[in-house]
Image: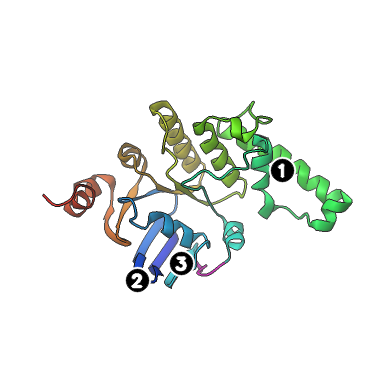
Amino acid sequence: MKSILETDVLCKYFGGVKAVDKVSIQVEDNTIFGLIGPNGAGKTTFFNVLTGLLKPSSGRILFKGEEITNFAPHRITGLGISRTFQNIKLFEHLTVHENVKIGFHTKTRTGFIDAVLNNNTFKEDEFKADKRGRELLKRVGLEGEEETLAQNLSYGKKRRLEIARALAADPKLLLVDEPAAGMNAIETKEIVDLMRNLNKEGIVIVIIEHDMSVIMNLCDKIVVFNDGNVISEGAPGEVKKDPKVIEAYLGKG
């Protein structure tokens, strides 16, 4: 199967701390790919490097065969990579609909002058963002919440809104950082179902998650990080039995 994302001996060092150390992975098209590992293993740093928030110390990143190492975040988003964050990042005092419309910024033609003049370019972009935003909110189960302030949503619905905003960039690859964290069993099942549906629609998903039942039941392939290194990779059943993985989570003996 063809790879959509590859890293080649990717490294990110902070002084003497090797947060990501010589990581080489391949994420295949049409799959859900899991990243697991103990706290501090380097998973979120890896996401930050992939999306341009941090520059790698060395190594390469390829997306659909094109090298994107050191690309700026907005350029990476424009190519088709979106993400959510471990700590939900919403505009709390804006409405649900306004939050998701912000996600269209890489897909619009409107410039500063267009906005000031309120010209046809601005009006067309606003119309498209409004329509598409409502469609995305329905897609993630937030229909009817358009005018609710983001701060008034439940935790689970905030996660859905963050995903909807990431989808506004029309990604081919969606990086999701701990989507089930802090959720109850019903909310977790809803997020898992949403991830499956998005994947069936053609979006490749890379997910960081500490809930092992989510990872084992959702992912086609899993990579395990520990101290910035990949210590295991394979199908869920293989990774689950790997002695190195058991030791990383539970310790020796």
Of the residues under marks 2 and 1, which one precedes in the sequence?
2
Q: Which residue is mark 3?
A: 61
Q: Secondary structure at mark 3?
A: strand
Residue 217 x/y as whole percent: 33, 38
- Residue found at the very far front of the displayed protein: 15
Is residue 233 shown left or right of residue 14?
Answer: left
203 is within the stretch colored magenta: no
Badge number at residue 16: 2
- Residue found at the very far bottom of the displayed protein: 58
What kind of colouring is applied to the model shown?
rainbow
Q: Nearer the viewer, residue 142 or 150?
A: 150
Residue 39 x/y as whole percent: 33, 50
Amino acid bearing label 1? Ala
Inspect this view and state whether residue 229 appears: yes
x 14%, y 52%: residue: 252
The alpha-carbon separation of the residues under discs 2 and 1 comes to 45 Å
68 is within the stretch colored magenta: yes
Q: Quadrant of residue 12?
A: bottom left
Q: Quadrant of residue 216?
A: top left
Badge number at residue 129: 1
Question: Magenta segment, which residues?
Answer: 66-71
Q: Secondary structure of the magenta portion, mostly? A: loop
Q: Nearer the viewer, residue 105 or 66?
A: 105
For disc 2, the neighbor class at 10 Å (few under 14, some 14 to 19, many from 20) is few
Figure check: 204 above or below 20: above
Is residue 250 shown left or right of residue 106?
Answer: left
Badge number at residue 90: none
Q: Secondary structure at mark 2?
A: loop
Task: From the image, state whether disc 2 or disc 1 is nearer to you.
Answer: 2
